Image (cartoon, coloured by chain):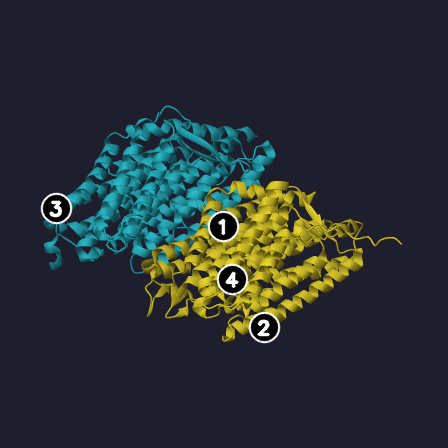
Chain colours: A yellow, B cyan
C-alpha cells in the first residue's frame, strides 16, 4: 500500500500572516477574561501582533534577500520581494489604524474587543492577498478582508449612516465578489488552471474569448475593491459612514492589498493579454482620476471629499499600471507606501478633532484650527500638501515616479491628463487650508482630543511623509527591485 | 569657496526653524530675529557678488552631491551671470520687507516671519538650482508660503486672490513637469545618460520639430504665467492688490523674475530652434503687454493697482529684450529685472506706508502731500522717475539696452515698445501729480507724519541702488555679460547647426 503523497508543509512564507491571525485569536480570548476598565490592553496586544508580523517580514527580507522567493502549498503562496514590500505597507497601515483607534473608540463609545480582532482579521486577509499566487487564494483572501471590513464599517450600531455604509459596502462587495468568482471560473475554463504561473503558460498559447471575458470580470472585481470608476459608487458612502479609523484602514491597507493582488494577477498571469488590459486600464485611469477630482470639489464633508480624492489617487496608480514594466509597477508600490502614510495621517487628524462634542467631519469644522491648534493644523496641512503633490513631500515623489513611468513608456498624454488632474485637486485640498488658516469659526471651534497613541500615529505618519519626500531614493529603489522578479 | 551657495540658500529656512522655538507672545523678538536672519543672509550673499568673476562664463561657486543616483538626480547648485544679480536682489529685498512689516503685520507675527523666511529659501533655491528636479522642488514648494502670505495677511478678497494665484501657477508648472520628464527620457535614450543636470542637458538639444516645440510651449506656459506675459496676467492684479505690502514687494520684486529667469535658463538653451520659431509670438505678446499694461494703468483709481498693472508693462520689456537674442537685449533684460524689483518694490513699499497712515490707496483721497510730508514726497519722486525710465536712474539703463536690442531685430519693434515708455511717463507722472502736488484737499491729510527712522532705513538703500545702477551700471552689467555672450553663442551654434 503506497502512502498518500502529502505535500511538504512550509509555513515560513505564511509566518507573518499567521502571527497576525494568532494575535487576532489571542485578542478574542483575552477579551473573554473578566476585567474592569477599557480595552487598551487589547489594542496593545493587536499592535504587538502587527509589529511582530512587520518585524518577521523585515527579518525574512534581511535573511533571504529581497530577490528570493519563498513558496508554499504547491505554489499557491509566494512570499517574494513584491509581497514583502506590500506586506510592509499593510503592516504600517494596520499599526497606524490601531494606534488611532484607541482613544477614538473610547470617545465615541464604540470600544470593544472584537474591533481589534476584526482589524487583525482584515489585516491578515490583506497580507494573504499580497502573497497569493493562485486565484483561489486571491478570492479567499479578498473575502477574509472584505467580510471583516463590512462588519467594521457598521461598528457604530446606533448611527444610521454607519449601518448604511456597512450594508452598502456588503451588498456591492458581495456582488463584486461573485463577479470575480465567475471570472476565476472562466479563466479556469480557458486555461485549466488557477495558479498564476500556469495560467500564464496556458494563456500564452493564443487568443481565447473565454479568457478575455474572465479577465474582464476579474478586473471588475478588482475595480470594486480598489474603487476605480465606474465601480466606485460605494466609496463615498462607506468612507463617510464608517468610523473614521475604519475608513483609514479601508483607504490604505485594503487598497494596497487589492493593488498588490491586481498587479500580480495582471503581470504574472496575464502578460499575454497586456495589449487588452492596457487599453482598458488607460480609459479607466483617465475616467477615475477625472471623476474623482471633479466630484471632490463639490464636497463639503471632509471624509466624503477624501473618498473622492482616494478615487482620484487610484486613477494615478492605474497610470503606473498602464505604464507597465518595472518602472510602472515599482512606482505603484512606492506610491502605495507614500499614500498610506499620507492618508492614514489625514484620517488620523480627523479622529483627533471634535467640534461641540461631535466628530469634526465637515470641512467647515476646521475653520480657525490654525490659530487654536497650530501644531495639529500644520500636521494636517502637510498631509494635504502631500496629497496635492507639493515637493518635497512623499506625494510629490510618488507622482513623479508614476508620471515618469508613463512618459518613459510613451503615454505622454496620459501623464498630461494626470498632472492636470493634480492641479484640479489642488483646489479642494487647499480649501481645507483656507478654512484652517484664513477663516474664523462660526460658533464653536474645533478642538483636539488629546491622545497619546493618536499623536504617536500622526508623528510616525508625518515622519514617513517627510522622509519619503526628502530621501526617496532608497525606498523607491527597493520598490523597483521588488517588482523586477515578477517581470522575468 | 564651496558650500557658500547652500549656506545662503538654507540659512533663512534654518533661521525659520529656530524662530519656531520662540514663544508667539514675544512678537518683538520674532520680528528682530527674522530681520537678523535676513540680514545675515544678505551679508553671507555679498561674497557671492563680490567674488563673482564677471569675465568667466561658466558656473561659479558650484556644489554637486548625489541625491537620487538611480534617477540621475543630483543636488547641484551654483550661480552664473544670469542668476547672480537675482540672488542678490532676493537677499536684498527680504530684510527690507521684514522691516516694512514691523508695524503693518500685527496678527500671527510668528507664522508671518517663519513663512517669509521659508519663502526666501524657496526663491533662492529656484535661482541657484542646476538640477531640473531640484529646481522643480523649489519652484513648487515656494508657491505655498506665498499662498499663505496672500491668503492669511491679505486684504478683503485675499482668499480668492490666493487660490487664483496658486491654481494659475500650478496648471502651468505641472505641464512643465511632464516636459521635464520628456526631456529627461529623450536625453537618456539618445545619450545613455539619464540625468536632470541642467548644464549637461543644455549641451544637448532635442531634435527640432513637434517634440521640441511642445516642450518649449510647456516650459513657456509655466514661465509666461509667472512673468506674467499677456494674456496670462489676470492673476496678477488680484494677487498684488490683495497681498499685504510685504507680499506685493516680494511678488513683484522676485517672483515675477522667476518666469523671465526660466526663459533664460531653460527655454533658450534647451530649445533653441523653438525659441527662434516662437520669437515673433513672444514679441507680439510682449508688445501687447507693454502697451495694454500701460493703458490700463492710466485709468486706475487705486495706486496699488496702478503699480500692479505697470508690472505687466515692465515685464513685457524684459521679455522683449530676452527674445531679441542680442547681447544688449539680454543684458538689458537682466538689468531690467533688477530695476523692476527695486523700483516697483519701492513703489509698493511707499504705497504701503501711505496706506498705514491713511488706510486708503485711492489717488482721489490724496493731494498736496508735498506740503505735509516733503521727505516722503521727495523719495517717492525718485522712485517714480526710476520706474518711468528717467536717464540717470536705473530704469533708463535697462530700457535703453532692450530698445537697442529690439532695434537690431526690427525698427518697428523698438518703435512700438517706445510708446510704452511714453505712456509710462504719462501714468506715473499724472499719478504723482495728483497725489503729491496741488493743494491739500482732505483735512485728514494735514496731520500726516513724515518718514520715520525705520522707513528711512528701508528706503535709503533702495534709492542708493537706484542711483548707483543709473550712474554706473557697469558694476552690475559687467557681471552678466560673459554668461550672456556664452548663452547666445550656444543658442546660435545649436540652431545654426541644423540651418540649411
- Cβ–Cβ below 8 Å for labels 4 and 2? no
**Residue holding disc 3:** B374
Report, in whole angstroms, how far the alpha carbon at label 1 lies from the one at label 2. Answer: 33 Å
**Residue holding disc 2:** A167
Alpha-carbon neighbours of circle 3 within 10 Å: few (<14), some, or many (≥20)? some
- Cβ–Cβ below 8 Å for labels 4 and 3? no
Q: Camera-side residue: B423 or A217?
A: A217
Q: Chain of mark 1?
A: A
Give the vertical position of B156 relative to A460 (above or below).
below
Q: Chain of mark 3?
A: B
Q: Position of residue A101 (x, y in %)?
A: 48, 62
Q: Are marks 1 and 3 on the same chain?
A: no
**Residue holding disc 1:** A395
- The residue most toward the front is A34
Q: Is residue B455 visible?
A: yes
Q: Position of residue A438 (x, y in %)?
A: 34, 59
Q: Nearer the viewer, mark 4 or mark 2?
A: 4
Q: Are marks 4 and 3 on the same chain?
A: no
Q: Position of residue A471 (x, y in %)?
A: 48, 41
Q: Are marks 4 and 2 on the same chain?
A: yes
Q: Camera-side residue: B466 or A193?
A: A193
Lower sequence index among marks 1 and 4: 4
- Cβ–Cβ below 8 Å for labels 1 and 4? no
- Cβ–Cβ below 8 Å for labels 1 and 3? no
Helix, strand, or loop for circle 2? Answer: helix
**Residue holding disc 4:** A42
User: Residue A447, located in which quarter of the rendered image?
Assistant: bottom left
Q: Camera-side residue: A115 or A356?
A: A115
Q: Residue at x 45, y 69 (%)?
A: A108
Q: Nearer the viewer, mark 2 or mark 3?
A: 2
Q: Position of residue B458 (x, y in %)?
A: 21, 42
Amino acid at each position: 500500500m503506497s502512502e498518500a503523497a502529502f505535500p511538504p508543509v512550509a509555513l515560513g512564507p505564511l509566518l507573518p500572516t499567521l502571527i497576525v491571525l494568532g494575535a487576532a485569536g489571542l485578542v478574542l480570548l483575552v477579551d473573554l477574561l473578566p476585567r474592569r476598565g477599557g480595552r487598551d490592553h487589547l489594542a496593545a496586544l493587536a499592535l504587538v501582533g502587527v509589529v511582530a508580523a512587520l518585524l518577521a517580514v523585515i527579518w525574512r527580507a534581511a535573511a533571504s534577500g529581497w530577490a528570493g522567493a519563498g513558496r508554499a502549498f504547491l505554489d499557491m503562496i509566494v512570499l517574494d520581494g513584491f509581497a514583502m514590500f506590500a506586506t510592509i505597507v499593510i503592516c504600517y497601515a494596520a499599526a497606524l489604524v490601531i494606534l488611532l483607534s484607541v482613544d477614538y473608540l473610547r470617545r465615541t463609545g464604540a470600544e470593544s474587543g472584537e474591533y481589534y480582532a476584526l482589524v487583525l482579521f482584515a489585516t491578515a486577509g490583506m497580507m494573504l492577498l499580497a502573497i497569493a499566487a493562485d486565484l483561489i487564494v486571491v478570492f479567499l483572501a479578498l473575502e477574509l478582508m472584505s467580510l471583516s471590513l463590512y462588519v467594521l464599517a457598521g461598528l457604530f450600531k446606533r448611527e444610521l449612516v454607519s449601518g448604511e455604509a456597512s450594508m452598502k459596502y456588503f451588498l456591492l462587495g458581495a456582488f463584486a465578489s461573485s463577479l470575480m468568482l465567475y471570472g476565476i471560473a472562466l479563466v479556469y475554463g480557458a486555461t485549466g488552471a488557477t495558479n498564476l504561473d500556469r495560467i500564464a503558460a496556458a494563456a500564452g498559447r493564443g487568443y481565447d474569448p473565454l479568457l478575455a471575458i474572465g479577465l474582464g470580470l476579474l478586473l471588475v472585481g478588482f475595480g470594486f475593491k480598489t474603487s476605480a470608476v465606474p465601480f466606485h459608487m460605494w466609496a463615498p458612502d462607506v468612507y463617510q459612514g464608517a468610523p473614521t479609523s475604519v475608513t483609514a484602514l479601508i483607504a490604505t491597507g485594503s487598497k494596497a492589498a487589492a493593488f498588490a493582488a491586481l498587479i500580480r494577477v495582471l503581470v504574472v498571469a496575464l502578460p499575454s493579454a497586456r495589449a487588452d488590459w492596457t487599453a482598458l486600464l488607460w480609459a479607466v485611469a483617465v475616467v477615475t482620476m477625472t471623476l474623482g477630482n471633479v466630484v471632490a470639489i463639490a464636497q463639503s464633508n471632509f471624509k466624503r471629499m477624501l473618498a473622492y480624492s482616494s478615487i482620484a489617487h487610484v486613477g494615478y496608480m492605474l497610470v503606473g499600471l498602464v505604464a507597465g514594466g518595472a518602472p510602472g509597477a515599482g512606482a505603484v508600490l512606492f506610491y502605495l507606501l507614500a499614500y498610506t502614510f499620507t492618508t492614514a495621517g489625514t484620517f488620523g487628524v480627523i479622529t483627533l478633532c471634535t467640534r461641540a462634542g461631535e466628530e469634526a467631519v465637515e470641512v467647515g469644522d476646521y475653520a480657525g484650527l490654525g490659530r487654536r491648534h497650530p501644531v495639529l493644523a500644520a500636521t494636517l496641512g502637510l498631509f494635504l500638501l502631500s496629497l496635492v503633490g507639493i515637493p518635497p513631500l512623499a506625494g510629490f515623489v510618488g507622482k513623479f515616479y508614476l508620471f515618469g513611468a508613463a512618459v518613459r513608456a510613451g503615454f505622454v498624454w496620459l501623464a498630461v491628463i494626470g498632472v492636470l488632474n493634480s492641479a484640479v485637486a489642488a483646489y479642494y485640498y487647499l480649501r481645507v487650508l483656507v478654512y484652517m488658516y484664513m477663516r474664523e469659526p462660526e460658533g464653536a471651534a474645533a478642538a483636539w482630543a488629546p491622545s497619546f497613541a493618536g499623536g504617536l500615529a500622526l508623528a510616525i505618519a508625518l515622519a514617513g511623509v517627510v522622509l519619503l519626500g526628502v530621501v526617496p531614493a532608497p525606498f523607491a529603489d527597493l520598490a523597483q527591485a521588488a517588482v523586477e522578479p515578477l517581470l522575468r | 569657496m564651496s558650500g557658500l551657495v547652500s549656506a545662503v540658500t538654507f540659512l533663512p529656512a534654518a533661521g525659520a526653524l529656530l524662530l519656531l522655538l520662540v514663544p508667539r507672545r514675544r512678537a518683538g523678538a520674532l520680528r528682530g530675529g527674522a530681520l537678523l536672519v535676513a540680514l545675515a543672509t544678505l551679508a553671507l550673499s555679498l561674497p557671492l557678488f563680490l567674488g563673482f568673476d564677471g569675465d568667466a562664463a561658466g558656473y561659479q561657486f558650484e556644489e554637486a552631491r548625489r541625491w537620487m543616483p538611480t534617477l540621475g538626480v543630483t543636488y547641484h547648485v551654483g550661480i552664473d551671470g544670469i542668476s547672480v544679480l537675482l540672488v542678490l536682489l532676493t537677499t536684498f529685498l527680504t530684510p527690507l520687507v521684514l522691516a516694512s512689516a514691523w508695524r503693518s503685520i500685527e496678527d500671527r507675527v510668528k507664522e508671518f516671519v517663519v513663512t517669509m523666511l521659508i519663502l526666501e529659501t524657496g526663491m533662492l533655491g529656484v535661482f541657484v538650482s542646476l538640477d531640473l528636479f531640484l529646481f522643480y522642488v523649489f519652484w513648487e514648494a515656494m508657491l505655498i508660503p506665498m499662498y499663505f502670505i496672500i491668503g492669511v495677511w491679505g486684504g478683503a478678497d485675499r482668499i480668492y486672490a490666493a487660490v487664483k494665484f496658486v491654481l494659475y501657477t500650478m496648471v502651468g508648472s505641472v505641464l512643465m513637469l511632464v516636459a521635464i520628464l520628456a526631456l529627461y527620457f529623450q536625453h537618456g535614450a539618445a545619450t545613455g545618460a539619464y540625468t536632470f543636470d541642467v548644464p549637461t542637458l543644455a549641451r544637448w538639444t532635442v531634435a527640432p520639430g513637434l517634440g521640441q516645440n511642445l516642450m518649449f510651449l510647456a516650459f513657456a506656459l509655466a514661465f509666461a504665467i509667472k512673468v506674467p506675459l499677456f494674456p496670462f496676467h489676470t492673476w496678477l492684479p488680484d494677487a498684488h492688490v490683495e497681498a499685504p505690502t510685504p507680499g506685493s514687494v516680494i511678488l513683484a520684486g522676485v517672483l515675477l523674475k522667476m518666469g523671465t529667469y526660466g526663459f533664460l535658463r531653460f527655454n533658450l538653451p534647451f530649445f533653441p530652434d523653438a525659441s527662434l520659431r516662437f520669437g515673433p509670438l513672444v514679441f507680439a505678446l510682449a508688445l501687447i503687454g507693454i502697451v495694454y499694461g500701460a493703458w490700463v494703468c492710466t485709468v486706475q483709481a487705486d495706486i496699488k493697482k496702478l503699480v500692479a498693472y505697470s508690472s505687466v508693462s515692465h515685464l513685457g520689456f524684459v521679455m522683449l529684450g530676452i527674445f531679441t537674442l542680442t547681447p544688449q537685449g539680454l543684458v538689458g533684460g537682466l538689468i531690467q529685472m533688477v530695476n523692476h524689483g527695486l523700483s516697483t518694490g519701492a513703489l509698493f513699499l511707499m504705497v504701503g506706508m501711505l496706506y498705514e497712515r491713511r488706510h486708503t490707496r485711492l489717488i482721489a483721497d490724496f493731494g498736496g502731500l508735498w506740503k505735509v510730508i516733503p521727505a516722503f514726497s521727495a523719495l517717492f519722486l525718485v522712485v517714480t522717475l526710476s520706474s518711468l525710465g528717467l536717464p540717470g536712474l536705473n530704469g533708463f539703463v535697462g530700457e535703453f539696452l532692450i530698445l537697442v536690442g529690439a532695434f537690431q531685430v526690427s525698427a518697428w519693434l523698438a518703435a512700438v515698445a517706445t510708446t510704452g515708455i511714453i505712456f509710462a511717463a504719462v501714468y506715473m507722472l499724472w499719478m504723482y501729480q495728483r497725489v503729491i502736488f496741488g493743494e491739500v484737499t482732505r483735512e485728514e491729510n494735514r496731520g500726516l507724519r513724515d518718514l520715520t527712522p525705520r522707513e528711512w532705513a528701508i528706503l535709503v538703500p533702495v534709492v542708493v541702488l537706484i542711483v548707483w545702477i543709473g550712474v554706473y551700471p557697469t558694476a552690475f552689467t559687467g557681471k552678466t555679460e560673459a554668461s550672456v555672450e556664452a548663452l547666445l553663442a550656444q543658442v546660435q551654434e545649436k540652431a545654426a547647426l541644423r540651418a540649411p
